[in-house]
């Protein structure tokens, strides 16, 4: 597919435009590298607040990613392989969190799961359980925003899968579960990895819905992006350092998995 | 889209960005004022009055005083800064760009606020130390957050009450929101935050005078303002006709 003769066909005007695109993405990261407080970087990144936020971020993003995969796979399956009434509507609904401003997502989560929300008021009255201000709320916010990415990646994978391979296995007497475990899932591994990484990365960066819905408390709901925001109010240099940490974590994961799905 | 159209679109958007930047620096018909979140209601009225009298439109950016001060130190184009604590005005003097015509223009008291249905049954300050109360404060560094912690220390309930904190909010307005929506059982905010709009949904629990903190609000012209004359005029306006508006909103006069 990919042609190895780019020079002959690339219009001259594309080079500066592409350069602008690269600069757009690279300059903020270069800026952070230059402004980070290198003289006290150990104190900023090794401090209790940073490590606590990092640990919480990893827990929240991983939980959200797993939840997105587990709940996203069956939905992706239905969207890819079954015709049903309202399918277009469902697909539009599923991508809504992607196009919704995260703070709106947070307000929506409050309206649903807040103490006076549709579901939240029932939880509060029947079980005396309040979700807001808990780590669970941070996970729910991250799950909400990362879910569409998992569904879209898995649906694309399922569509690309040759169903005849599964049919052949069934014809040879394999049970449904066996086909899923030994044929479908292994063939889909690269897309599952892509879905996991994309939803994980989105969950790791989640800010607006989290601070609106879950609040901001160290060790419970203050993920790295919230810690960056809090430090930015009083100590921007430290915020630059924390931002670098966040970028480094995301970069290591994306780069480490590049062979899997990024080419 | 043809290539020419694409290049044109790019040029236009770059030009638009450039114009946006230059227009704000030398237009005397517009003034940028950064003000503490607790001043939102009062300053919005003062800004409208000021525009009516002078024809100068005031563009406000409301937020936590610490965040606003940091933005100004970082070079945000602001003409006037009104802070909820002297400390963050000092920061601009110390870390740049400096201030002119600094004056205290108002004072404020703090209060405990609870949702009207008062789910945690809070009737006095000491109730904030009761185990399990979902307490929301402004973050440390935010004036309202620092004052709140000072009050809890004055009352001798700092340890127990701070253990009840479920969220450190960006500014005092966010504290009010968390109580208003009923998510939090209680918060500590300024008495002026209980505006007419929210009065029906929030109840106030007074903090005794011997432990309460009186917040002093300074205002000043930022030294590198491109419109120092209009900026000074606005400061004078706050100290003059603005005082009545501030009193209407529950602020105390500056000493």
Image (tube, coloured by chain):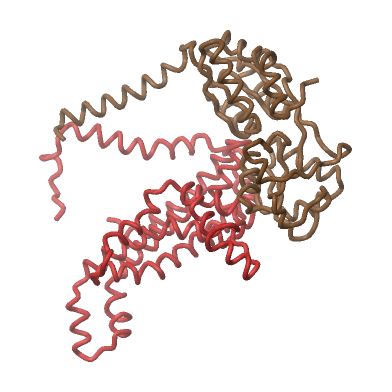
Chain colours: A red, B brown
Q: Residue, x 40% and y 35% (percent of image)?
A: A27
Of residues B197 and A228, the one nearer the viewer is B197
Residue B61 against residue A160 in the figure, above or below: above
Q: Residue, x 81% and y 53% (percent of image)?
A: B127
Which residue is farthest left? A8
Q: Residue, x 22% and y 34% (percent of image)?
A: A15
In percent of width and height, residue A145 lies at: 43, 55
Residue A191 at least partly seen: yes
Of residues A125 and B216, the one nearer the viewer is A125
Q: Is residue B27 left or right of residue A93?
A: right
Which residue is farthest bottom? A173
Figure disc tally? 0
Split into 4 quadrants, where in the image is the C terminus of chain A?
bottom left
Residue A30 against residue A67 in the figure, above or below: above
Q: Residue, x 60% and y 41% (percent of image)?
A: A231
Split into 4 quadrants, where in the image is the N terminus of chain A?
bottom left
Which residue is farthest right? B210
Residue B66 at least partly seen: no
In percent of width and height, residue A37 lies at: 57, 37
């Amino acid at each position: 597919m990919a042609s190895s003769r780019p020079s002959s066909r690339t219009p001259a005007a594309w080079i500066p435009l592409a350069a602008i695109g690269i600069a757009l993405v690279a300059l903020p990261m270069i800026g952070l590298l230059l402004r980070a407080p290198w003289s006290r970087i150990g104190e900023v990144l090794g401090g209790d607040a940073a490590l606590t936020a990092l640990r919480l971020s990893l827990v929240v993003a991983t939980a959200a990613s797993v939840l997105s995969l587990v709940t996203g796979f069956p939905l992706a399956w239905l969207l890819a392989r079954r015709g049903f009434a309202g399918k277009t509507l469902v697909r539009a609904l599923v991508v809504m969190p992607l196009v919704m401003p995260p703070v709106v997502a947070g307000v929506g989560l409050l309206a649903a799961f807040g103490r006076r929300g549709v579901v939240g008021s029932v939880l509060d009255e029947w079980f005396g359980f309040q979700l807001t201000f808990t780590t669970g709320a941070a996970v729910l916010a991250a799950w909400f925003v990362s879910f569409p990415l998992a569904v879209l990646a898995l649906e694309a994978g399922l569509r690309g899968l040759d169903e005849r391979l599964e049919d052949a296995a069934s014809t040879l007497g394999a049970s449904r579960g066996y086909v899923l475990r030994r044929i479908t899932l292994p063939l889909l591994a690269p897309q599952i990895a892509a879905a996991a990484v994309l939803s994980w990365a989105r969950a790791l960066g989640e800010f607006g819905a989290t601070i609106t819905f879950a609040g901001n408390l160290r060790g419970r709901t203050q993920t790295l992006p919230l810690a960056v925001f809090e430090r930015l109010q009083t100590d921007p240099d430290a915020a630059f350092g924390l931002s670098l940490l966040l970028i480094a974590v995301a970069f290591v994961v994306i780069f480490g998995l590049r062979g899997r799905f990024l080419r | 889209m043809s290539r020419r159209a694409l290049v044109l679109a790019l040029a236009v958007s770059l030009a638009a960005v450039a114009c946006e930047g230059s227009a704000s620096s030398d237009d005397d018909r517009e003034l940028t004022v950064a003000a503490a979140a607790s001043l939102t209601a009062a300053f919005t009225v003062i800004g409208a009055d000021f525009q009516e009298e002078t024809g100068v439109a005031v563009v406000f950016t409301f937020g936590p005083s610490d965040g606003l001060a940091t933005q100004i130190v970082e070079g945000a184009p602001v003409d006037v800064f009104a802070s909820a604590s002297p400390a963050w005005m000092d920061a601009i003097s110390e870390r740049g760009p400096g201030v002119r015509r600094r004056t205290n223009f108002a004072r404020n008291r703090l209060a405990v606020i609870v949702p009207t249905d008062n789910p945690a049954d809070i009737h006095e300050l000491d109730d904030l130390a009761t185990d399990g109360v979902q307490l929301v404060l402004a973050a440390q560094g935010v004036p309202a957050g620092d004052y709140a912690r000072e009050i809890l220390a004055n009352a001798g309930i700092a340890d127990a009450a701070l253990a009840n904190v479920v969220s450190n909010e960006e500014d005092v307005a966010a504290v009010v929101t968390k109580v208003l929506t009923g998510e939090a059982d209680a918060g500590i905010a300024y008495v002026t935050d209980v505006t007419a709009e929210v009065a029906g949904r929030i109840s106030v629990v007074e903090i005794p005078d011997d432990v309460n903190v009186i917040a002093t609000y300074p205002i000043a012209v930022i030294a590198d303002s491109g419109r120092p004359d209009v900026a000074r005029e606005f400061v004078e306006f706050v100290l003059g006709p603005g005082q009545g508006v501030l009193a209407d909103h529950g602020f105390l006069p500056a000493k």
